[in-house]
Amino acid sequence: MQLLDHVSLSVPDLARARPFYHAIFNALGAEVVYDHADAIGYGERCDRSQPGHSYLTVRASAAPLSADPGRHWCFKAASHAQVRAFHAAALAHGGEDDGPPGLRPHYHADYYAAFVRDPFGNRLEAVCHGDAQQALSR
């Protein structure tokens, strides 16, 4: 079951956020659904013929961000290489490292993830749940 249809996160400066989010979602192979002055959408929109799709919107917000270490957004990666590319793209575009790419066996044996913070403090993760073929390329 695909649980999410779409979700949104907010940033105080969308112009500053745009290159960061374009870079990380490009690294994960996610398409830009739309790019407006007040919001950018990534992923694949759902419709009757594709109900399993999902997308994320990054919205401009005048409200200040509240720090909450328990809140984060995790994105699926198709490979360990995509997790590494996500992490590198984030760091190259103003993000901060919050956990380098690597296995997280406390979640499960093949949980390969990286954690970053966007330029505004939003905590983001990319994860690949792995398989035997990916384990050979670690």
Image (spheres, rainbow, N blue to C red):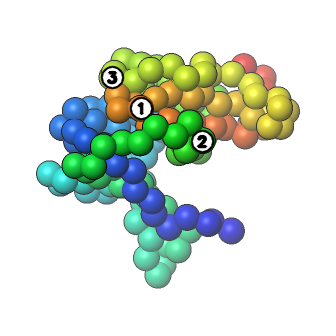
Q: Position of residue 129 (x, y in %)?
A: 72, 40
Q: Evaluate whether residue 107 shows in this view.
A: yes
Q: Which residue is mark 1?
A: 121
Q: Amino acid at mark 3?
A: His
Cβ atoms under marks 3 and 1 closer than 8 Å: no
Badge 2 crowding class, 10 Å Cα cut-off, few under 14, some 14 to 19, many 20 or more, is: few
Q: CA distance from mark 3 to mark 1?
A: 13 Å
Closer-to-camera residue (52/11): 11
Closer-to-camera residue (92/31): 92
Please report the residue visible at 74 percent of the width from the left and 25 percent of the height from the top: 103
Please report the residue visible at 46 percent of the width from the left and 37 percent of the height from the top: 67
Please report the residue visible at 41 percent of the width from the left and 42 percent of the height from the top: 66
Closer-to-camera residue (81/115): 115
> Which image quarter holds the C terminus?
top right
Q: Amino acid at mark 1?
A: Gly
Left or right of 1, for residue 54: left
